[in-house]
DNA sequence: TTCTACATTATAATAGTTCTAAACTATTGA
DNA sequence: TCAATAGTTTAGAACTATTATAATGTAGAA
């Protein structure tokens, strides 16, 4: 454990107790320079690689959902047998490579703003997500 | 059974045997004027309402996937514990009402074409799907 | 009508996720 | 400092959607 103070502060300020499990998960998710996508399964693997203290699956689920609710993670809408999350919470869209089963960020500058010229009465727009499915170009 | 000839022809022409289960599922899916969204669960309920012959769950899954592969149904990318399908296979996007857990079509005329100004080498775009999440406006 | 390839079916299996309830612990306040 | 308590972790069971399996059934061709 080195500089966890930022995570401790982050957790505390959002009303989450800075337990060692949550701090470890913060490290795995937010220490790296680059943001990334993951499934719960992949996250569990990353965690077990970076620590000897086992964190139970249930705690990983709880923590990911807590972080998602706090806005530290985004869930990516995609048809899959498992949920995909993104540590990049800034506004951006995705390619989904159906051949490779791989998610790729689309820089927000590369997408013209999506204009929706209709509304549902009594509802407000929470998010607009674009998923661009791609496949191998064999033509 | 009334005018099933259209479905029989449709199935036959796409290389699917027009069995009575498939014809019944066609009726439930395509008889109505309006297109609609459904989960497998909901479809099973619709089927059992409209017939006394029970169709097994496995057959419903098989048939829906076959129809999806033939392009008679579209799967809607959304984070959910179950898959959503759409009998409207024309190009259009969706609202997802997170309060009501309800999918609503967005008329394609109400969305400006989405321009993606970047590509992935060796891949071609298969589809561009927009999901607009909405929630109750309480502000 | 008979044959055969394909379909259907019930059931089992699998996998992702959520639930439960007991043990644990960070924080509060005495 | 220490005890109380409110929230947290945990293992495992339970749940649910989906897929696989293998036996039975059947549409369509010969």
Image (tube, coloured by chain):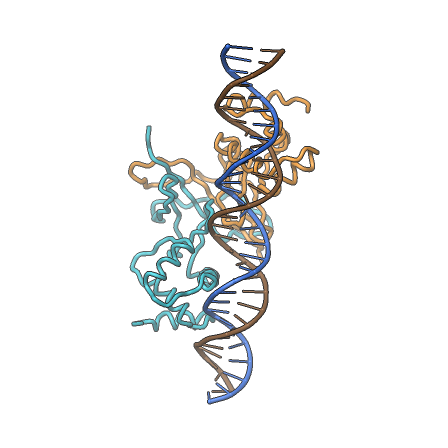
Chain colours: A orange, B cyan, C blue, D brown
In x, y percent, where is residue B15?
A: 47, 71
Q: Which of the 4 image quadrants contains residue A121?
A: top left
Q: Is residue A115 toward the left or the right of residue A121 in the image?
A: right
Q: As displayed, is residue D7 above or below residue B53?
A: above
What residue do we see at 33% from left, 37% from top?
A123
Q: As displayed, is residue B64 above or below residue B82?
A: below
* Of residues A41 and B36, the one drawn nearer to the viewer in this rendering: A41
* Of residues A62 and A137, the one drawn nearer to the viewer in this rendering: A62
In x, y percent, where is residue A66?
A: 51, 32
What residue do we see at 39% from left, 40% from top?
B98
What residue do we see at 34% from left, 66% from top?
B52
* Of residues B126 and A119, the one drawn nearer to the viewer in this rendering: A119
In x, y percent, where is residue C6?
A: 51, 72
Q: Quadrant of the N terminus of chain A?
A: top right
Q: Which of the 4 image quadrants contains residue B74?
A: bottom left
Q: Which of the 4 image quadrants contains residue A88?
A: top right
Q: Quadrant of the C terminus of chain A?
A: bottom right
What residue do we see at 63% from left, 35% from top?
A55
In x, y percent, where is residue C12?
A: 56, 60
Total marks in image: 0
């Amino acid at each position: 454990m080195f500089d966890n103070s930022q995570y401790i502060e982050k957790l505390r300020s959002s009303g989450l107790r800075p337990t060692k499990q949550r701090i470890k998960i913060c490290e795995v998710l937010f220490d790296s320079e680059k943001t990334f996508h993951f499934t719960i399964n992949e996250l569990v693997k990353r965690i077990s690689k970076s620590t000897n203290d086992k964190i139970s699956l249930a705690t990983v689920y709880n923590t990911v959902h807590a972080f998602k609710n706090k806005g530290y993670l985004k869930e990516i809408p995609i048809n899959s047998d498992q949920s995909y999350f993104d540590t990049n919470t800034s506004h951006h869209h995705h390619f989904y490579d159906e051949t490779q089963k791989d998610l790729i960020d689309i820089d927000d500058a590369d997408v013209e703003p999506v204009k929706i010229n209709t509304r549902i009465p009594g509802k407000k727009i929470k998010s607009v997500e674009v998923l661009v499915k791609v496949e191998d170009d064999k033509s």
